[in-house]
Structures are given as C-alpha cells and as structure tokens.
Amino acid sequence: MRHLYLFIGLWAIQLSYSMAQEPIDIKYASHFEVNYHSDGVKTLMIKNPWPNSDEVYNYALIPKELFESKKIRSNYKDFECIEVPVKRIVLSSTTHIPSLVDLDEVESIVGFTGTQYISSKEVRTAVNNGMIQELGVNEKVNIESTIALQPDLFIGFSINGPTRAYEELKRFGIPIVYNADWIEQSPLAKAEWLKFFSLFFNKEKEAKALFEKIEEAYLAAKQLAKSVIKQPSVISGSLYKDIWYAPGKDSWAASFIKDANANYLFSDWGGIGSSSLSIEEAVLKGVDAQFWIAPSQYTSYQQMKEDNPHYKVFTAFKNQKIYTYALSTGEGNGLLYYELGPHRPDLILKDLIAIFHPELLKQYRPTFFKPLHP
Amino acid sequence: MSTYQKFTVLIVLCIIALLLNLSLGSVSIPFLDSLKSLGGTPIKNSSLEYILWSYRIPKAVTALMVGSSLALSGLFMQTLFRNPLAGPFVLGISSGASLGVALLLMGASFFGITHLSYLTTTVGASIGSLIVLSLVGTVALRVKDSMSLLIIGIMFGSITAAVVSLLSYLSSKEELQQFIYWSLGNLGAVDSTSLSILSVITVAGMSCGILLIKPLNALLLGESNAKNLGVSIRQTRIQLIVITGLLAGSATAIVGPIAFLGLAIPHLCRLWFNTIDHKIIYPAVIIAGATFMLLCDTISQLPFSSAVMPINAVTSLIGAPIIIWLLIRKKQLQF
C-alpha cells in the first residue's frame, strides 16, 4: 500500500512538471539541443563543444523532487544527472554573465574563474561583497576552492578537448557542463545560449521572452540597414609585424558587417575563424576602405602610428574613421564587448549601422564601438 | 672557371635575386612596372607603388644586410675557433637576444607593461645580446685558449636557454605565441630607424673586418704559427668578437634569430671557390650571404599566395640540402 502511495505521489509530481514546463525551441544555435520527457525530466545534448570535435555530451536535468527516485535515475543512467533548479553555480567565462543577469540569477553565482574581467555592475558588486569567489584560470581552476564551494553545477568550456581539472572535479561529484556558445558563428545563435542557461533554473519562459526581444531588435535593425542602397567599404583587424589578422569571411564578426549592409573588403579569405593575410594584400585590398572597425587592442591613432608606420597609408586612418570596442570597459579589466557582445548582437549591429549609415540612427549612443582617440 | 668568373656569376646571381625579391610577393607587381618604378616612373596603381617602396624595398635591404652580416660573422667564428661547426651564434649572442625578448614578452605582465610595440622587442634583444657579448668579452680578456672561450660561449647559451624555458613554462599562451613568432624571424617589419642603424653597423663592421683579413689568414695556420708571423692573437680575438657581436647582434635584434645561414654560407663559398684564403672568401661570403637571404625571403613569401612562411624555416630547408649535395659531390670539406 505504501508503495502505491509513493507511486501515485511520484506520478503526480511528474505530471505537474510535464505540464508546468514550457518546452523551448531552439531556432539558431546548433551546438545544443533540448528534449522534454513525459516523466518531467529534460535532456540536454551538447554537440561538438570545441573545434574539430565530434564529441557529444548528454545531460539529464532532473527536478529536485525526482532526483532521488531510483526509477528515474535508472532511466537516465547513460546521462550525467543534474538536479534542477540549480542554486549554486560556477561560471568560467564572462560570456556566461549577461544571461544570468537577464534571468535574474546573479545570486546563484557562487564562483567564477577570472573575476577581474567581469564588467557587469551587478555582478561586480556581488564579487566585491564576497558573494562570488575567485577560482583562478579556467584551464587551471583551483580544484580545492571549487570543491569547498560545493556548487550544484560548473559551467565550463574547453578550446581543445576535455580539461583535466574538470575531470578531477567530476570525481568529486561536481557536475560539469561544457558551454559551446563561443563556437556558434551566427550572431543570433550565440545569443540564443541564453536559453541554455534558463534550463538549469526552469526559467525557459523568461528566456523565450528575452530572446524574442533581442531577435526582433536584431532583425529590425538588419531590415533598417537594408534600406540604404550604397554600401560603404569596411576593413577590420590589424597587423602583427607584417601579417594582417582579420575576421574570416564567415566569422561571427564579419556577419555583423554584412548585416549592417556594408562591404567587407577582406572577405576573400578565411572561414569561420580569423584569417591572416600578407601586408601586401591587406594594403592592395583595404587601402581605400571608408571604415575600419576593431583594430584589435588599439585605442588611439597615436598608438597605431607608433606601432606600425604602414597604418598611415590607409584612407580610414587618414580620415580618422576607425572605431574600436577597446574603449568600452566596465569596472573590471575586461572589455564589455567580449562579455555583453555575444549576448546582445542587436546592440553590436546598431553600433555598426550608426557608424556606416549615420543618417539611419540619429542621436544614437553606441554601446561598444567608439571612435579611436587621436 | 677562374675566380674572377666565379665572382661575376655571384654578383649577377645577387642582382637577379634582388630583382626577383622585389617583383615577387603575395601581390603580383608586373616585373617591368617595378623596374620602371625603380627608374623613377611611379606605378599607376598607388597601392602597388606603396607596397614596392614601403614594404618590399626596405625588406630587400634588410635581407641584404642581415644575410651578409650573418655570413661574415659565421666566417669569423669558424676561423677564430678553427671549427667547422661554429656559427655567428656560438658566443651566445642569439641566446642573449632571446633571453632579452623572452623577459620582455613573457615577463611584461610581471613588470606591469601592457602595451608592447614592435620596437620594444628590438630594444630587448639588443640589451640581451649586448650583456652576453660583454660577458664573453670580459672572459675573452682572461682566457688564453680559444677553445675554452668556445665552450664558455656555449655554456652562456645553455644558461639563457634554461631561463627562457622557465619563462615559457610560466607564461600564458598568447605570450608564448608572441615569443615563438619572434624566434621564427621576420624581415618585413623593420622600421626606418632600425634599418638605418642596421645598415650603418653592417657597413662599418664589414669595413673594419677588411683590416683583419691578414690576421685571419694567419689564424688558419694555427695560433702558434700565427704568433710567429707577428699576429697578436689576443688582440685579433677581441677584434673579431666585437665585430661579430655587432654584426650578428644587430641583425638578430632587428629581425630575430636567423638560423643556419651563418654556418652554411662560409662552407658554401669555400667549396665553390675551392680555397680558404680570406682575400677571396671574405667578399664571396658577403655577396653569397646577401643572395641566399634574398632568395629565402622570396620563397618564404610564397609568390602569388597569401600565405607567408617563417623565414627561419626556409633558410634551413633550402640551405641544408645544398650543403649536403656539395659535400657529396666534392667528397671533402674545404676547411
């Protein structure tokens, strides 16, 4: 009889979960997938979390009430099980921060690798108040401090394969989920990883609404840019010695230029990553470009001139039409662009439209891209 | 072929290498156009004109200077130490330079330097090689035996190498990558000030070296015989070390450590001219070094493609087979 009650109880919980959950659909992102099951569990699949990998990670996100259920656990024994909602989370990249801020989950962050790079005001306050602990560098995360924090979840990332420190943490029962937002190439796909974070807090509904806003704003800005017929010419990147490093033609950065209705002059080279061209080609192709965006770390014309005399030959340099994101910082040492940019592609796109087609966005205040200092 | 004919061939080769170097690159500039531009008629496309005058010509001059400096330094060291394996860097000059650059690139964050321009690596390399050079110079004043000096030079090299590997172990990926880029050598990022300094030192070093041709020939007979001929071994040794230090040191500081060339070119010249007389080898090494460097740079630019190979890889890849082939053909090393 006791078993029957238990069974009915369990069934009722499962039913309530499967009804309360609002399944979220993934429109742009290609490196994660979610499936909702009738027993109240959602499964998350992370695909190829680093370049040239065919690795797939499967996680089962199990509601707290069902987490101890042997039946449920046996159904998902091939999955790494995570209890949701998560209360204590560790993050490893500033790109994770804006999603948590938007989902109103800053209080859940207990640890971070590289807190000095965080720009978000809210999260900085939490760091300063000692609510978020510094855990070192991602690949060499401080294992002892992390274990002592007892997080429910560690959101990690790896650029070239399973990280040894993560394997160690797993041995101590800390679930690790690989985030692959940085591999996504389209601006909206990167931003859609907000939905990934919402899964752990059962906040899919909020994420859906937030993402729709970003998506609408992005598509509207893209449409607005299309109204202009004349495309200005644009170059990007900078020289290191005599090699010019620029975003590849299919890269995330290059897609903003395209969507802002401008002509990216270095689009003959490279794929999704960065491409390197010889100085000769960079001069030949790019010397007459009207605009130059993101000249790596430079913040002033003076600095550029001192560093490499070849910059002076470019028209965009002569006409002072260079714009950088390196001048937008928060209180930390990191650049706002790296933290908030992937999450808010609409703002990046509008910044660029305001630069390339100033007549379209009058009185616009840029978030990331600002003119270089003299 | 007489020696004169061989010299004529060498000079013609050098001119061809220079013209090839100026007209081939990742962007194609018509050969006639570049000739005309050299003659004073600008190319219609102003970008091409810029590429030729502001990139390719400075790069070619750098190659000329570096090639001849390193080849000559190699010759000096081989004769001084009577050792066919000696090269411009046996005294630890390149290790000193790499230590300077490593301290700068990989210790920069430690010193609180955030912005490193290209010039700072030149300064770092110069200071590093100067320190090692003055240490070796001080030792040279005390040690009587050239062989001990050779070993001491190698020991200095080992010490600096150890410090460099320690620094690389402790530094970040980006810093390490920058250091590796430096160690691969680069002829194309030399600013006009550095190029003028390099040219002055190279020309001065070569001119002073001419005065040493006689003592160099005497050294070939062994130190005791040279002494009997009235050559002051100690003085010659110091003079050779200072000139080599300046030539190889400035070249390394400005373009990075260029491997192999300094070791190989003197052998190449001795084998081809079939002599060890410095009156012939001295000028031959200068021209051959410059020619070889120009050719290697042309190849490293992989004409008509956007890829650029590191110059350091090219010098060995091209040079080593030539030496092997010559040795097999001649069956005996000329030394």
Image (cartoon, coloured by chain):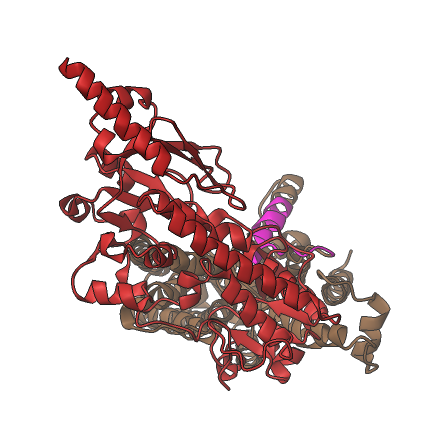
Chain colours: A red, B brown
Is residue A133 shown left or right of residue B95? left
Vertical placement of residue A118 versus A67, above or below: below
Q: Nearer the viewer, residue A231 or B149?
A: A231
Q: Nearer the viewer, residue B261 or B207?
A: B261
What residue lies at 29% left-to-right and 31% top-to-bottom?
Answer: A81
Is residue A104 shown left or right of residue B101? left
The spot of residue B297 in percent (x, y) is 64, 60
The spot of residue A297 in percent (x, y) is 46, 70
Residue B309 among those drawn in magenta: yes
Q: Nearer the viewer, residue A114 or B9?
A: A114
The spot of residue A363 in percent (x, y) is 54, 82
Q: Residue furthest top?
A: A1
Kindly tell me whether residue B224 is visible in this rendering.
no
Quadrant hosting residue A226: bottom right
Residue A37 among those drawn in magenta: no
Q: Quadrant of the N terminus of chain B?
A: bottom right
Quadrant hosting residue A359: bottom right
What residue lies at 58% left-to-right and 54% top-to-bottom?
Answer: A251
Q: How many marks?
A: 0
Kindly tell me whether residue B334 is visible in this rendering.
yes
Vertical placement of residue A155 versus B245, above or below: above
The residues colored magenta run: B304-323
Q: Nearer the viewer, residue A219 or A116?
A: A219
Is residue B175 shown left or right of residue B112? right
The spot of residue A200 in percent (x, y) is 32, 43
Does the magenta stretch mainly form a helix, a strand or a loop? Answer: helix
Is residue A53 shown left or right of residue B47? left
Vertical placement of residue A202 versus A364, above or below: above
